[in-house]
């Protein structure tokens, strides 16, 4: 798994327990995974179809730098499946693990269309 980008946890990202708000993290994950999927498909016309179980493992705190690891899991006719791990950059402690995120390539009407990539091309 390659780690592609990083974010700094700032005060506005915290929940009442003074740890990174899960909703904020999920928003970042969806964005990072969508960018990864776009790069694989060479297209920005796709939507998030499914996010599997989300395993929150350790909290992130203000000042932590977290990084997003993404990997291609599989390709469908019009879909791409990726996995995501988020970890603390300094300690390497896992923050979140998601085994499966599915993105579907769509046309202007929002209907699935083939993405045109082959399994050995990704």
Image (spheres, helix red, strand yellow):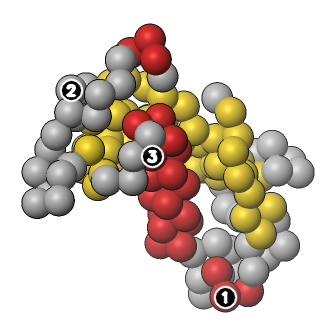
User: Eyeballing the image, is 97 above or below 45?
Assistant: above
Residue reaching furthest right?
90
In the image, what residue occupies the spot 73% across and 64% down? 7
In the image, what residue occupies the spot 47% across and 35% down? 40
| Mark 1 element type | helix
| Mark 3 element type | helix
In the image, what residue occupies the spot 77% across and 69% down? 8
Determine the CA span between mark 1 and mark 2. 40 Å
First reached walking from the N terminus: tag 1 or tag 2: 1
* Closest to the observer, 19 or 46: 46
The crowd level at tag 3 (other Cα within 10 Å; few <14, some 14-19, many 20+) is some
Determine the CA span between mark 3 and mark 2. 15 Å
Instruction: Give the residue number, with chain letter if any, for mark 1.
Output: 12
Residue reaching furthest top?
120
Q: Residue 86: percent from the left, percent from the top?
A: 64, 48
Identify the image quadrant of residue 75.
top left
Q: Residue 72: percent from the left, percent from the top?
A: 48, 28
In the image, what residue occupies the spot 64% across and 72% down? 20
User: Eyeballing the image, is 118 above or below 97?
Assistant: above
Instruction: Give the residue number, with chain letter if any, for mark 2.
Output: 77
Determine the CA span between mark 3 and mark 1. 28 Å
Q: Residue 76: percent from the left, percent from the top?
A: 25, 26
């Amino acid at each position: 798994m390659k780690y592609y980008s990083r974010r700094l946890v700032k005060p506005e990202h915290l929940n009442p327990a003074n740890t990174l708000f899960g909703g904020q993290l999920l928003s970042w994950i969806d964005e990072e995974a969508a960018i990864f999927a776009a790069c694989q498909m060479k297209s920005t016309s796709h939507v998030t179809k499914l996010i599997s179980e989300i395993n929150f493992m350790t909290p992130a705190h203000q000042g932590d730098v977290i990084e997003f690891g993404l990997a291609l899991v599989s390709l469908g006719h019009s879909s791409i499946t990726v996995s995501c791990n988020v970890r603390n950059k300094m300690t390497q402690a896992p923050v979140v693990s998601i085994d499966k995120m599915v993105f579907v390539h769509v046309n202007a009407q929002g209907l699935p269309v083939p993405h045109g990539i082959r399994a050995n091309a990704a």
